[in-house]
Image (cartoon, helix red, strand yellow):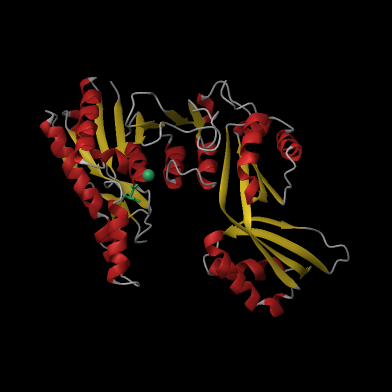
Amino acid sequence: MARIVVKFGGTSVADIERIKSVAARVKRIVDQGNEVAVVVSAMAGATNQLVQWVREAATLHDAREYDVVVASGEQVTAGLVAIALQEAGVDARSWLGWQIPVRTDGAHGKARIAGIDGDALIARMARGQVPVVAGFQGIGPEGRVTTLGRGGSDTSAVALAAAVRADRCDIYTDVDGVYTTDPRIVAKARKLNKITYEEMLELASVGAKVLQTRSVEIAMNHGVRVQVLSSFTDEPGTLVVDEGEIVEQEVVSGIAYSRDEAKITLIKVADRPGVAAAIFGPLADANVNVDMIVQNVSEDGRATDLTFTVSKADYDRAVQILEARRASLGFDRLVGDKNVAKISVIGVGMRSHAGIALRMFTALAEKGINIQVISTSEIKVSVLVAEEYTELAVRALHTAYGLDAA
Ligand code: ASP
Ligand code: MG
């Protein structure tokens, strides 16, 4: 017997037929003798529709009322899943965020969970009842409904699993696990049986949108074992676990890519203290996230070129901010390029193996792909290349690190 939190994403509860098959699946897990709590997303597309209505009502809207509207999608599915479970003969009861309560901070639209009281749910599960919890929502310090940011029901599920001390949190979605890379690009991509929290975080941060990043952080901090699996098959999925649980660790676990990057180079920036702060300060103030940054030493000690990346969506704003400050920052000119992609190889094995980056550079060189910018972390090497080489680069690296399926 285990205590399991199971979460179903929007596609898994997209219509009544699917909700009935979710109920049937939950019943099977209960019948195996497990204690189960369910967390649900809104029906696929429902949240988008709600967001659109809010925008149509007012471009500049009150964030508290935005949350009241967009949180409603999960209320519908929590009730429907509870009804379908009851209909299948399972004792079930729905719970909204405020009823548990799931306490959050007051950052409406992107609230962070401050704490969840798991006692009531633990007591109900002990008597054989299945709580069906509306994901994505909580209650703020002022007693108002909050939401956790798009994709936030993953975070609800993992945080709830921590609060009820669950043995596992199973996230049912429309993919059957985490792959070595995007199977749409590389036919030989393999499903991973296990991946570490840290690798999952890096994958999420470079665009593999399987889990909300925040949910992985919570899982890592609380040691929640998370499984990503499909609600349309009965195959085991991918377990996201602590490094110690993985016996045969590959050096590289996955290759990720992001086409959402743009490159900015400032030519002949003054080489003196305070310049980097003067450049990145205004960008940060405008909420522009800067990712890779490269600055070389200057030949003459006076001026140097500075290159960095921002997301494509922030590009125009970043250029505008910098051009407006050209005189005070003292750079010669700005050269921008939106035609770039970031390719990353990720693996905790990098900590203990040398030559990982070299293998990347060699594989790309063999394909004639020029590397524009390089950045590394303890378990990741990223390069920026021209966007048209994205697929070629990902395939070449997948082969170079021995990840291709047999
Ligand atoms: N329904 C919310 C969204 O679409 C939360 C979620 O699905 O995780 O973002
Ligand atoms: Mg999701």
Residue 169: quadrant of the picture: top left
Q: Nearer the viewer, residue 244 or 30?
A: 30
From this view, report whether residue 39 is shown above or below residue 322.
above
> Which quadrant would the N terminus be assigned to in this image?
top left
Q: Position of residue 125 (x, y in %)?
A: 20, 31
Q: Position of residue 332 (x, y in %)?
A: 76, 73
Q: Nearer the viewer, residue 371 or 366?
A: 366
Q: Residue at x 13, y 31 (%)?
A: 91
Q: Residue at x 67, y 51 (%)?
A: 386
**How many marks on residues?**
0
From this view, report whether residue 158 is shown above or below residue 167.
below
Q: Position of residue 133 (x, y in %)?
A: 24, 42
**In the orientation shown, which residue stands out farthest toward the right?**
300
Q: Residue at x 33, y 40 (%)?
A: 157
> Which quadrant would the C terminus be assigned to in this image?
top right
Q: Position of residue 337 (x, y in %)?
A: 65, 61
Residue 144: quadrant of the picture: bottom left
Q: Residue at x 62, y 35 (%)?
A: 395
